[in-house]
Image (spheres, coloured by chain):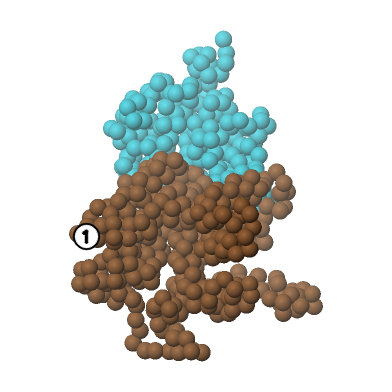
Chain colours: A brown, B cyan
Amino acid sequence: MSAAAKVMPRRPGLRERMREFAGRHRSTTILLGMLAITLVLPFIVLLPPFSGFLTQNVWVEQFNTAGIYILLVLGLNIVIGMAGLLDLGYAAFFAIGAYSYAAVASQFTGIHIPFWPWLIMGAIIAALFGVTLGAPTLRLRGDYLAIVTLGFGEIVPVFFTNSAELAGGTNGISAIDRPSLPFDVNIAGQCVTCFSASQPWGFYITMGLILTGVLILCYRLQDSRLGRSWNAIREDELAASSSGINTVTTKLLAFAIGASTSGFAGVFSAARNVAVAPVQFGFTVSFTVLAMIVLGGMGNIWGVAIGGFTIFVVQQVFLPQLTNFFNSVQVPILSDIDFVQYQFLLYGIALVLMMLFRPEGLFPNVRRRRELHTESAGAEELVSPDEATPEV
Amino acid sequence: MTTGNGSEVMLRLDNVHAYYGRIQALKGITMEVGKQEIVTLLGSNGAGKTTTLKTVSGLLHPRSGKVTFEGRDISKVPAHKLVKAGIGHAPEGRRIFSRLSVLENLQMGAYTRNHSEMREDLDRVVTLFPRLQERLKQAGGTLSGGEQQMLAIGRALMSRPRLLLLDEPSLGLSPILVQQIFSIIKEINAQGTTILLVEQNALQALTVAHRGYVLQTGLVNLSDTAAGLAANEGVRKAYLGED
């Protein structure tokens, strides 16, 4: 970072050239970027102040969970951000992905299907449920769709809670198989092919790969014919239909593709936690993911991913640390507050502040910024550099 | 099969009944549009003009009766397939994609077509509407009302329709813009596109149209050549504001 900053004044074209490279070779850029991030993150946490909070392996564990949330955010961003369908029950697909793996890879059923093929199967199953939910609700819009999906999000955990024989009831399913690889690789004393709580590196690398794939997929989709038709449907469904877009299949595909990434997340999470229980998939998950999207900048893929990551780290790492800190220094009043308990209050405050001061999110999508700031922006500014080059 | 002025029939509605839920909007519309014609639908609010266009473009399906386009029964064909079949619809209230740029709006209009053909259509549209050329990169929602109407018509033209349905293109426009829009409509027709035009501005519509139908509460009340309708006393009283 500092090296790049030093170089920039001497070679003013570097930033533009990097931007141009990123525009032309999007998938390569994502690949390189994700590689850099996955390599750098575990070492950043060795530096203060991060090293003071948690040990490296615990940090990596947290990153794995953060990765699960980022997958959920990316999937829901397709449904809400790109296609404009307000889905409040998104955690249901996460639950379905997780339970599907729990059912085929534990003592509970006695079946032991390996993790790797099921990663794909889980995504397919979640996508099928996406279509199942999508098909009857397609005629609904806005508030009505939100209510129906909210209901679906509640039904799924309740179903798992009440079906003791199928899904273990309230306790859920435990002793789920961990992934394994037929070989061992050790780098610097760490087992990078191990999948356990104390050796989280295997999960970490797997998550890095999944995220890279999903990010590339998201960007490809956004620029595709399908992405354009999602845009059009979000803007005006009737006009989209008069432009020759099959709104039924287009919306179904948004539900299916959106659900599939949460299928990945579900299978991954079940294997990592070694247990699934209905309580993990409540409304708070759907809500948290939605909040991440709104804060990150709805519709902007890397924006929501970073938003999700930031919120997760704040919630899971910094709030507990804040509590510990005030406890240890004995500040009156503050030391009695458990900040973790107030996380939803803090979310609420953050959301209200965002709506007041930066409604387009931290890293806004070009179109949303355009819509929310039409008075301040002149007509010329409405054109972003990457949109200034027409495709025709 | 020929229409009143002798050209080949392109679109035929045969005793079409259409409903919104339980409310009946069309009570048996029978009409024809010939190739290369401009046909206008006149009538007061609630007469069923917009509904007729919707049943033609597939946004609404008739409960009974038949819609035939170029000899093919399209009564139950969904809207998105009819775009490919050659029916373009500039819907009521413009309905442009306000957050997409003008260019993207036009590209969406060419959704059913392949990339190489699009360039030519884009050229044609911006030649018809030079104002759009200047604003290609601007967000659709920031255009003025007249420009939005041009964009809506332009977008419908991008699918290179053989039949263009226009729903109140003059709505909310200044008199000078109305003149402009109507002369462009004439030009589009001269380039070979058949036009079915719904208009409140009956006087203007009758000056560009070849023939017209007067609808009243879901039924065809009268049909004649444009000149015939303009001379008709009932029409003059009801729609042209004469005592």
Which quadrant holds the C terminus of chain A? bottom right
Nearest to the observer: residue A216 or residue A227? A216
Nearest to the observer: residue A299 or residue B86? A299
Image-based side of A116 in relation to A217, left or right = left
Q: Residue at 59% of width from left, 75% of height from top?
A: A51
Image-based side of B194 in relation to A43, left or right = left
x, y percent for residue A255: 39, 55
Count neighbours of disc 1 (C-alpha within 10 A) and say few if under 14, some if 14 to 19, many if 20 or more.
some
Q: Residue at 27% of width from left, 72% of height from top?
A: A105
x, y percent for residue A62: 49, 70
Nearest to the observer: residue A334 or residue B5? A334
| Looking at the image, residue A183 lies above or below residue A225 | below
Residue B10 visible (yes or no): no
Q: Residue at 37% of width from left, 26% of height from top?
A: B25
Q: Residue at 24% of width from left, 75% of height from top?
A: A112
Marker count (numbered): 1
| Residue of label 1 | A166
Which quadrant holds the N terminus of chain A? bottom right
x, y percent for residue A229: 47, 54
x, y percent for residue A302: 56, 64
| Looking at the image, residue B17 lies above or below residue A373 | above
Nearest to the observer: residue A230 or residue A318? A318
Residue A171, image quadrant: bottom left
Residue B94 visible (yes or no): yes
**What amino acid type is highlighted by mark number 1?**
Leu
Image-based side of A67 in relation to A371, left or right = left
Most extreme residue toward the top is B243
**Element type at marker 1?**
helix
